Image (cartoon, coloured by chain):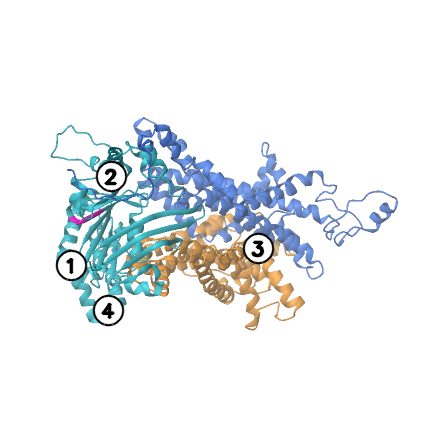
Chain colours: A orange, B blue, C cyan
């Protein structure tokens, strides 16, 4: 186990390094600098600004400076939000996105797993058909459609829920539904096919032959096996919830990391782009390690090496 | 040997003739054999029985006609701005149009109205659908190409080759894809624009650098899933007897991979590609919605929806039309893929 | 003559599976009687209904299967009339089963100990340390060394032979009256097969339970069984003691089966004779004898009518028109001579 974690940390560092390098050079391929867009900037002032942030130096020098800063945990200063470090911005914006994503993840698992299982137990019956139709439709709805529909119904027509921001608990309802619709439907489909697969396994017949009750055969023998593909999916799901919330954040005007990132790209806030990318990459890799460990706990056949 | 026989009275009296030997043809006439069918014919038969999948195929067909063929004959162009016809509601006519109608001229109706620049919205949605479908299809094709070649090489050769190739896949897999896509889609278009001006690369200009950069980005990142699937299939298949037989006959590696292995995972490839199409369309609409996809005046379903977001309280149909089309496209491709998987995936067939 | 008490008493059982393609008549008038402590072999090729027959004794029929005629009695219970909840009490306690493939029959995510203890807890009053103790005893009984260590291991950490021993331990947890063994050695290596068979014979001597041995391997039944039922296309075509079947086979299918096993003590150059043709499609069961299309001695009547039962000494009987032919000719001669 410690060996496994060491290996994964090493792998994460390699990935983070590659992501950082790739991001750095790709970002600098774009013509135009961060200070071009601003009006009435004299060439002198621009040169002064570029000198201040080290943008006048050759690219490889900038790269080395940035990377050595990164080694010390320094993400640098934001170019657009004067006086604030990238680390500060991330630490205020990330918790907002993380809370929203986390709630959406829980909601997706909480609904997806039981719905998928119930559909599998009632294969071919009306319940199954209804659940299959809904989950198949659910993975075809773009989040901007579901969120605007929700807003249209609950804010414009019924005036029940606040449409913007995350000021109170009610304001979480619509963003969470919009964000978890796809993963919940996906998990339900995954769970259904995996449960059907497990129900056809020989060990389920053994359980029946032993005289195990339906309840126990579902919860003890089937569930633990059937949930394995869902656990595998949690890694990519987390990544897509953290990044997929960009649209939700834009529509519901939520001050999260996603809107910050898109803003940084369009305004060429280099350190901000770098910081966010590296931070999210490391976060997602870390989450993947946790998912892998969870998987190994649930499935004793998996040895972490 | 001979045993005592107990008499059993028969309920009916057979005739002597009944005990005559039966001819071979008499025997064979009674054997009702199930028709033996090939894998493909069996799969197609099952697919055609699946009503949901057949309807999905029909809808995909309809969408292709609507998005690719109808725009060629449509009286309006997607970039054509009509002065005085801005922000029309569905089926509404502008003043000039009403005047010309009063003169007895025929004016083609704006089924979905027009946008703020006086462009017919119906044709924009259709062309947007065409753009989204093209991105989905081309990206999936590229993913199929790269993924299957990469995966089959790794799976076939195994050992160190496989180890190294799969570590690379692992790294790409853990990279947060959407971040990289956004970044690349945003930055690739500049070098592409430059390249488009170079002789011999005019096609880039024609397609639009944004579109090309989007193809590239998808192809660069999403092939890993395909590669993993193909690799695991090849690993199983290469153990089979006919590969050993082909090797014994002196077939080279390229021939074995191309002729024996790829052909045998074609079912999986078709299914995975079909299911890849909606996910590519999804990502494209996502990027366009964030304003990072194809550039104006070319519409895509995502950018149309994004542009309609601000005014959607007053013009909800401007948002729901492209969004609904995305929904239908993705849904029907998913259902089509599900149907193909049920019909052609040998693993599911056994159950 | 008093009614004898049987452990298993199946009378004219008919069982069908209802599939999307139609009704598959898996069992067609099957009758089996078995006394306590007896070992019965059911022999036949795949799809002949041998497993379906045995499974129906513990009510373990697939969801789409139903007994559509006849009765199934086990240890005084009318299985075909019992509810799932009542059946559950019998399963694992009065009747147990071991399956063909020990690789897939154990749940991969629970330890061996957990899976054995589950059976003990379900059907006995034992709790806590007693359960653990009993599980250890069972592993010792089936010849697994270091039982304490094995209890904490997962199925994938054991070899195929060991897993089958674990399956047997689970089956014997509550000392059942009947053990059904569904091709228990087919998935194992030849050397392991012999060990498992030996173990089963041993346990039979120690515990005295009845065994139903389902197999397509005549070698297995010869060494273990008291009686043998030969099944073909959902019917018992011949039934008798092991000696009856091996030395006085009456049905053409049984004879064919015997011709297809290698005999080492006979002349080297004797050829094995395969049975030509394919098994019947039970979706469209034939009007006449199921084996007729493959039978070398097929007659016209075989294709038109089901053969009646011909009884011999003891329990031995068979269903074949050839056996009726001689009878018929004899009777006919008799009739002629009377005139």
Q: Earlier in the sequence, mark 4 or mark 2?
A: 4
Local packing at callout 1 (Cα closer than 10 Å; few below 14, some 14-19, many 20+) is: some
For the question of whether residue A49 can be seen, the reply is: yes
The residue to which callout 1 is attached is C208
How far apart marks 4 and 2 lie (CA) works out to 45 Å
Q: Is residue A160 magenta?
A: no
Q: Nearer the viewer, mark 4 or mark 2?
A: 2
Q: How many marks?
A: 4
Magenta span covers which residues?
Answer: C224-228
Foreground residue among B118 and A34: B118
Q: Earlier in the sequence, mark 4 or mark 1?
A: 4
Q: Position of residue A151 (x, y in %)?
A: 62, 64
The residue to which callout 4 is attached is C124
The residue to which callout 3 is attached is A142
How far apart marks 2 and 3 lie (CA) works out to 68 Å
Q: Circles 4 and 1: CB distance less than 8 Å?
A: no
Q: Position of residue A292 (x, y in %)?
A: 36, 57
How far apart marks 4 and 3 lie (CA) works out to 55 Å
For the question of whether residue B184 can be seen, the reply is: no
Label 2, secondary structure: give it. Answer: loop
Dot 2 falls on which chain?
Answer: C
Q: Which mark is residue B278?
A: none
Dot 4 falls on which chain?
Answer: C
Q: Nearer the viewer, mark 2 or mark 3?
A: 2
Callout 4 and callout 2 share a chain: yes
């Amino acid at each position: 186990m410690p060996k496994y974690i060491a290996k994964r940390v090493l792998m994460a560092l390699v990935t983070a390094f590659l992501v950082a390098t790739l991001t750095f050079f790709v970002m600098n391929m774009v013509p135009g600098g961060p200070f071009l867009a601003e009006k009435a900037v004299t060439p002198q002032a621009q040169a002064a600004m570029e000198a201040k942030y080290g943008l006048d130096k050759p690219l490889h020098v900038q790269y080395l400076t940035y990377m050595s800063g990164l080694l010390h945990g320094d993400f640098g200063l934001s170019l657009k939000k004067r006086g604030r470090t990238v680390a500060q911005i991330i630490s205020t914006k990330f918790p907002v996105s993380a809370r929203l994503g986390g709630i959406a993840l829980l909601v997706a698992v909480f609904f997806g797993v039981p719905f998928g299982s119930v559909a599998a137990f009632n294969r071919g019956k009306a319940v199954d058909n209804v659940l299959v139709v809904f989950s198949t439709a659910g993975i075809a709805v773009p989040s901007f459609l579901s969120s605007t529909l929700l807003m249209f119904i609950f804010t414009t027509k019924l005036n029940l829920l606040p449409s913007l921001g995350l000021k109170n608990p009610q304001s979480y309802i619509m963003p969470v539904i919009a964000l978890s619709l796809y993963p919940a439907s996906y998990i339900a489909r995954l769970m259904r096919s995996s449960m059907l697969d497990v129900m056809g396994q020989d060990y389920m017949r053994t359980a029946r032959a032993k005289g195990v009750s339906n309840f126990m055969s579902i919860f003890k023998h089937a569930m633990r096996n059937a949930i394995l593909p869902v656990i595998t999916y949690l890694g990519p799901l987390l990544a897509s919830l953290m990044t997929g919330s960009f649209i939700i954040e834009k529509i519901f005007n939520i001050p999260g990391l996603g809107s910050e990132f898109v803003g940084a790209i369009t305004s060429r806030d280099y350190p901000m782009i770098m910081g966010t990318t590296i931070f999210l990459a490391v976060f997602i890799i870390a989450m993947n390690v946790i998912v892998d460990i969870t998987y190994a706990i649930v499935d004793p056949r998996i040895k972490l090496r | 040997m001979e045993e005592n026989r107990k008499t059993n009275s028969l309920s009916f009296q057979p005739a002597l003739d009944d005990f005559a030997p039966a001819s071979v043809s008499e025997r064979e006439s009674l054997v009702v054999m199930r028709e033996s069918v090939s894998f493909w014919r069996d799969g197609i038969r099952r697919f055609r029985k699946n009503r949901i999948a057949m309807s999905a195929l029909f809808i995909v067909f309809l969408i292709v006609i609507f998005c690719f063929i109808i725009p060629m004959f449509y009286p309006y162009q997607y970039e054509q701005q009509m002065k005085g016809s801005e922000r029309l509601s569905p089926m509404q006519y502008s003043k000039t149009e009403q005047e010309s109608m009063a003169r007895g001229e025929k004016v083609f109706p704006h089924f979905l109205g027009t946008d703020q620049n006086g462009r017919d919205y119906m044709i924009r949605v259709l062309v947007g659908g065409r753009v989204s479908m093209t991105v989905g299809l081309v990206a999936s094709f590229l993913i199929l190409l790269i993924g299957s070649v990469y995966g089959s090489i790794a799976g076939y050769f195994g050992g160190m080759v496989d180890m190294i190739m799969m570590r690379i896949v692992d790294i790409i897999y853990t990279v947060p894809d959407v971040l990289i896509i956004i970044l690349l889609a945003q930055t690739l278009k500049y070098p592409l624009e430059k390249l488009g001006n170079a002789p011999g690369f005019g096609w880039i200009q024609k397609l639009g650098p944004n579109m090309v950069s989007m193809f590239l980005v998808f192809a660069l990142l999403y092939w890993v899933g395909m590669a993993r699937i193909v690799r695991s299939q090849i690993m199983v298949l290469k153990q089979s007897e006919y590969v050993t037989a082909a090797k014994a006959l002196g077939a080279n590696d390229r021939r074995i991979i191309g002729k024996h292995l790829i052909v045998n995972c074609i079912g999986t490839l078709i299914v995975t590609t079909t299911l890849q199409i909606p996910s590519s369309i999804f990502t494209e609409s996502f990027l366009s919605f964030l304003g990072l996809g194809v550039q104006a005046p070319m519409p895509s379903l995502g950018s149309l929806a994004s542009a309609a977001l601000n005014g959607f309280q007053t013009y909800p149909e401007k948002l729901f039309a492209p969004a609904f089309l995305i929904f239908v496209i993705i849904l029907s491709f998913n259902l089509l893929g599900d149907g193909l998987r049920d019909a052609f995936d040998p693993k599911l067939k056994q159950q | 003559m008093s009614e004898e008490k049987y452990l298993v008493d199946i009378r004219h059982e008919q069982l069908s599976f209802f599939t999307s393609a139609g009704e598959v008549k898996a069992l067609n008038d099957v009758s089996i009687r078995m006394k306590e402590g007896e070992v019965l072999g059911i022999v036949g090729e795949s799809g002949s209904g041998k497993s379906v027959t045995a499974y129906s004794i513990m009510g373990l029929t697939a969801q789409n299967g139903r007994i559509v005629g006849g009765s199934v009695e086990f240890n005084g219970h009318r299985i075909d009339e019992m509810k799932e909840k009542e059946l559950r009490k019998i399963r694992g306690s009065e009747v147990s089963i071991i399956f063909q493939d020990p690789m897939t029959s154990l749940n991969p995510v629970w330890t061996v100990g957990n899976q054995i203890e589950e059976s003990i807890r379900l059907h006995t009053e034992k709790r806590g340390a007693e359960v653990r103790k009993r599980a250890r005893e069972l592993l010792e009984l089936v010849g697994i060394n270091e039982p304490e260590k094995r209890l904490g291991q997962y199925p994938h950490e054991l070899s195929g032979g060991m897993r089958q021993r674990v399956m047997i331990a689970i089956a014997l947890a509550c000392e059942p009256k009947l053990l059904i063994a569904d091709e228990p050695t087919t998935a194992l290596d030849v050397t392991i097969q012999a060990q498992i068979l030996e173990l089963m014979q041993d346990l039979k001597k120690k515990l005295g339970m009845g065994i139903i041995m389902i197999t397509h391997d005549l070698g297995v039944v010869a060494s273990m069984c008291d009686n043998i039922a030969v099944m073909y296309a959902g019917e018992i075509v011949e039934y008798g003691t092991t000696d009856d079947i091996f030395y006085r086979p009456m049905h053409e299918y049984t004879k064919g089966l015997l011709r297809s096993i290698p005999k080492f003590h006979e002349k080297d150059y004797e050829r094995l004779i395969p049975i030509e043709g394919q098994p019947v499609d039970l979706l469209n069961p034939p009007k006449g004898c199921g084996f007729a299309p493959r039978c070398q001695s097929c007659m016209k009547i075989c294709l038109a009518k089901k053969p009646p039962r011909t009884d011999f000494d003891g329990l031995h009987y068979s269903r074949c028109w050839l056996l009726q032919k001689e009878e018929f000719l004899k009777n006919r001669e008799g009739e002629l001579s009377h005139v």
